[in-house]
Amino acid sequence: MCGIVGYLGKNEKKEILLDGLQELEYRGYDSAGIAVIEGEKLNQFKAIGKLENLREKTKNYHSEDFGISIGHTRWATHGKPTELNAHPHLGAYSYVVHNGIIENYQTLKEELQADGVNFLSQTDTETIVHLFEKEHKTATSVFEAFEKTIERLEGAYATLLITEADPDTIYFAKHGSPMLVGFNGDDVYFASSDTPIIGKATEVYYLEDGEYGYAKEGELKLFDANGEKSFTKQALTADKVLAQKDGYRFFMEKEIYEQSRVMGETMMGRVLDESIAFDELDETLFDGIKAIKICACGTSYHSALTSAYLFERIAKVRCDIEIASEFRYKEPLLTDDTLFITISQSGETADTLEALKMAKRAGLKSLSICNVDNSSIVRESDAAILTRAGIEKGVASTKAFATQSMVLWMLALYLGQQRNTVSKEVLKTEISAMLHTPKALIVTDELHEKLHRLSKRYLHGHGFFFIGRDIFFPLALEGALKLKEISYLHAEGYPAGEMKHGPIALADSELFTIALMPKTMHYDKIKSNVEELSARDATILAISPEPFDLADDFIQTKYSSHPMVEFFEMMVVTQLLALEISVRLGNDVDMPRNLAKSVTVE
């Protein structure tokens, strides 16, 4: 995700910012920028693409006297990766950088535009700097204007603001997105993680939600809702790899925990009170469309399988799912009344890209669902929806699958709106369920500890069956894929009703069955299927909101109001189970053998 660096002091600020931003490259970005105030002179530089482009732009710039400075690497969420959309964002005399999502930005933007403010970017962040300058007109101090600004922000944010109205001070605030303050003598550093300031700062304070304040030379004032507060610094770690993981053992573990937050960013500006909106789509995209064909590989293929149930159930449009590596050689029938959708985390998946080119040559409209803007698949497609998951370093995909599934759910509803196949009552129910999804993705200490304890039972045997029905069948496929990718144990996903058509022959005490048993969908049917396996001595791990007496192990889920909410909660359980089994086996969770993050060859 986006990265923040700030520095206040007498050292050369450009290099501190650029070196710090380079340490944040692991988070992913598509543009970068810096802003520096020395004396009363403000300088700013932005560039799209890699940091080398920003270094080239700033090669003749040096800043060696006391000053304040902020920098940012941006992962596009609102608007394309352009210099105008890159941070820092400029008001009339102030600059701001920001990580997170300002949920009420549209309301604030309309209010500011009514006051005559001209917006240059498509981002939610630009509202912060214009709102600050509006408040500054009537405030008694710069700090009061900043306080009034952050009082009006809703959502998640970590933000730094500098202004010519107070050229020796950096203002900061944190709510929901990480940010810390580093110290070394009179020098003060800000960053969104430890890595940019390791080797520069000697002590650190990790900001808590709701804290804000300002820094001057050798001084930092901290406030929360109760007023000014004291704080205790601590020694800064010297381990940059550990710092990148934010204290988690593995990037995959970190990414599982991030899912609750990134899901909010995926929905932001798209899930409205009474409708689904995709500003990036032209409404004519679906004109003349009578069917959908989705092409993907691996985890993306499983999210596509899930969506087929949703497109046909909600939008009442036929939806066919194809494995990209097979699609290319089957001489498929392609008609121009079919929307061709490709799904890829990286946007560089070779088989999926070639399938897209085939569809384009056949004259089909195309839409890509991807995590990386300006990737090959996005550039090749007529339209694209970004999942906004942020970079995913673990080879075994977690948050990419979650955000792909959410985008497809939203798209099914969006198409249902256009085709009038979904009532206002159903739409309201679906939107309510979507808004509850981030809560279902929260990993509690109790859940993680329970999965850690029971994982020791699942290190042997002759294989795993993950079983489910309806949308939980693709989730079973995905759960099995996660386990085999990182544990190297044999696992299969199956429709629960198919077990008696052959696979149940394998059932004995050494066969582990992971049963996805949602309360909202075919519970009695799958219960019967699991009972058949239990009668053959299969070891059962049941995942359900409803206690199951025959289960050898049982994970009780909390949410049972909507199938998709149950889907996402059970998804987290299967991911953590795979993680903990793999850890016990001593495997490299982030870099499993024989696998690559992006498959760019056939």
Image: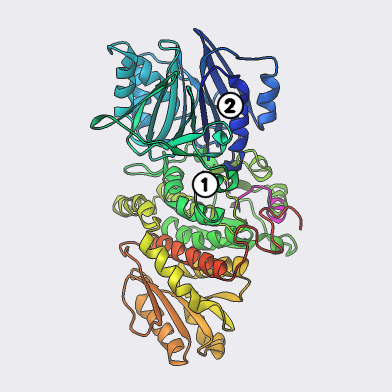
Task: Tell which circle, 1 or 2, labels the residue nearer the N-terminal end.
Answer: 2
Q: Position of residue 513 (x, y in %)?
A: 49, 80
Neighbours of disc 2 within 10 Å: few (<14), some (14-19), many (20+): many
Closer to us: 76 or 499: 76
Checking the image for residue 389, the label placed there is 1
Residue contact at pointers 1 and 2, CB within 8 angstroms: no
Q: Which residue extends farthest left?
A: 226
Closer to us: 469 or 264: 264
Residue 573 within the magenta-colored segment of the rendering: no
Q: Position of residue 150 (x, y in %)?
A: 33, 27
Tell me which segment is drawn in magenta. 340-353
Query: Is residue 495 among the parts visible in the rendering?
Result: no
Up-down relation of residue 132 to residue 106 (above or below): above
Up-down relation of residue 595 to residue 517 (above or below): above
Instruction: Name the residue: 32% across, 64% down.
Output: 558
Q: Position of residue 128 (x, y in %)?
A: 40, 24
Instruction: Name the residue: 42% across, 45% down.
Output: 267
Up-down relation of residue 363 to residue 17 (above or below): below
Up-down relation of residue 218 to residue 80 (above or below): above
Mark 2 lies on a secondary structure that is helix
Neighbours of disc 1 within 10 Å: few (<14), some (14-19), many (20+): many
Going by the numbered disc 2, the residue's amino acid type is: Leu
Which residue position holds label 2? 17
Going by the numbered disc 1, the residue's amino acid type is: Ala
Q: How is the image coloured?
A: rainbow
All told, the count of numbered labels is 2
Distance, label 1 to label 2, CA atoms, is: 25 Å
Q: Give left or right: position of 570 versus 291.
A: left
**Could you say which quadrant of the image residue 24 lies in?**
top right
Q: Give left or right: position of 379 versus 34.
A: right
